[in-house]
Image: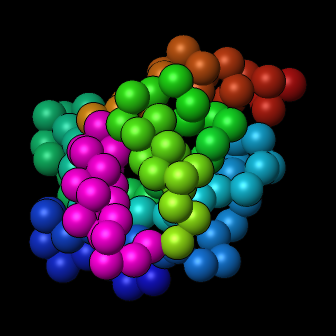
């Protein structure tokens, strides 16, 4: 996969997607998109983020549920569902884009690794 060329680009991988790193189960798709955040000095840092859609880990999250429902109904993309798929992917990526790291969990994991 290459990097997105601007903040509106979403690059998708639908074939041979790696397993979910959270549960080791299968992932439905991988999205790569531009992402930025503020560092400790308040400066904007730009980069690229990837997200995997996992039916086990992402269940219960509205935008993921809608996309997973499409995959459950139609396991292949075709002309009839392509527009719907595009809208659902865009909504899911936008919701992923706004997720932030759980700092408490990250610190717990760092502490347990250091022990």
Across and down, in percent, residue 17 comes to 63, 70
Q: Along the horizontal axis of the image, is 69 left or right of 20? A: left
Tell me, yes or no, if residue 73 can be seen here: yes
Q: Main secondary structure of the magenta part?
A: helix
Position of the C terminus, as image quadrant, is top right
- As drawn, the residue found furthest toward the right would be 115
Check if residue 26 falls in the magenta segment: no
Of residue 93 and residue 40, the one placed in the foreground of this image is 93
Point 39% across, 77% down: residue: 78
Instruction: From this view, report whether residue 107 is shown above or below residue 24.
Output: above
Position of the N terminus, as image quadrant, is bottom left
Q: Along the horizontal axis of the image, is 15 left or right of 89? A: right
Q: Which quadrant would residue 22 be assigned to in this image?
A: top right
Tell me, yes or no, if residue 11 can be seen here: no
Across and down, in percent, residue 106 comes to 58, 27
Across and down, in percent, residue 52 comes to 54, 54
Check if residue 94 falls in the magenta segment: yes
Point 27% across, 57% down: residue: 84
Q: Which quadrant would residue 94 be assigned to in this image?
A: top left
Point 32% across, 70% down: residue: 80
Q: Which quadrant would residue 63 be assigned to in this image?
A: top left
- As drawn, the residue found furthest toward the front would be 80
Instruction: From this view, report whether residue 28 is shown above or below residue 40.
Output: below
Of residue 3 and residue 78, the one placed in the foreground of this image is 78
- As drawn, the residue found furthest toward the top would be 104
Across and down, in percent, residue 10 comes to 28, 67
Of residue 81 and residue 88, the one placed in the foreground of this image is 81
Give the magenta range: 77-96
- Colour basis: rainbow
């Amino acid at each position: 996969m290459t990097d997105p060329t601007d903040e509106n680009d979403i690059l998708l991988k639908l074939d041979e997607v790696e397993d979910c790193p959270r549960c080791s189960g299968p992932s439905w798709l991988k999205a790569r998109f531009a992402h930025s955040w503020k560092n400790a000095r308040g400066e904007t840092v730009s980069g690229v983020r990837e997200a995997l859609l996992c039916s086990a880990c992402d269940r219960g999250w509205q935008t993921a549920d809608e996309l997973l429902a499409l995959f459950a109904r139609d396991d292949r993309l075709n002309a009839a569902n392509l527009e719907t798929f595009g809208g659902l992917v865009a909504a899911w990526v936008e919701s992923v884009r706004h997720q932030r790291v759980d700092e408490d969990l990250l610190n717990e994991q760092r502490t347990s690794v250091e022990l």
